[in-house]
């Protein structure tokens, strides 16, 4: 089986989360369906907190796809249902990170996502 470009990005991102950011594989979930306003959507990667809440949502795009406002709007819509603290969008070449501000109902861009906190 040949890896599709988006799947290549997804696999590399999981590797990055495990090896660079030290997230345990047991907290990483890949390509599952979720329901938003009666629409079925699929997320690419979700990283859970140990308590079962969602720490991070990752949206993966193929390398030829330009990441723009539409991409962030898509992940922000997903996050209305998931309530993740952090969002990441990547096409394998460019990576963007943000942290949710639920009180102000907006997100704040970051230079990177934090490493896994084992405490």
Image (tube, grey):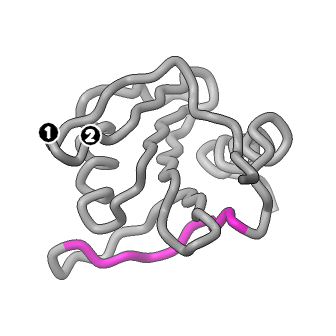
Q: Quadrant of residue 40?
A: bottom left
Residue occupying the point 75% across, 38% down? 21
Badge count: 2
Q: Please, is residue 92 above or below residue 28 in the view?
A: above
Horizontal and vertical percent for residue 93? 61, 22
- What secondary structure is marked by label 2? strand
Q: Are marks 1 and 2 in contact (CB under 8 Å)?
A: yes
Q: Tell me which residue sits at (55%, 32%) in the image.
A: 91
Name the image quarter holding the N terminus. bottom right
Decide which of 37, 8 is in the foreground and name it: 37
The segment highlighted magenta reads 27-36
Image x and y of residue 45, in percent: 57, 57
Q: What residue sits right under mark 2 in the picture?
A: 101
The answer to whether 15 appears left or right of 60 in the picture is right
Figure check: 5 above or below 26: above
Closer to the camera in the image, 17 or 7: 17
Q: Which mark is residue 104?
A: 1
Indicate whether 6 appears above or below 24.
above
């Amino acid at each position: 089986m040949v890896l599709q470009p988006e799947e290549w990005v997804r696999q590399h991102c999981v590797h990055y989360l495990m090896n660079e950011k030290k997230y345990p594989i047991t907290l990483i979930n890949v390509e599952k369906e979720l329901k938003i306003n009666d629409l079925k959507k699929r997320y690419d990667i979700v990283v859970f907190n140990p308590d079962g809440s969602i720490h991070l949502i990752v949206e993966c795009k193929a390398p030829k796809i330009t990441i723009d406002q539409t991409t962030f709007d898509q992940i922000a819509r997903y996050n209305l249902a998931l309530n993740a603290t952090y969002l990441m969008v990547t096409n394998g070449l460019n990576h963007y990170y943000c942290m949710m501000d639920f009180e102000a109902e907006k997100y704040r861009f970051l230079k990177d996502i934090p490493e896994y906190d084992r405490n």
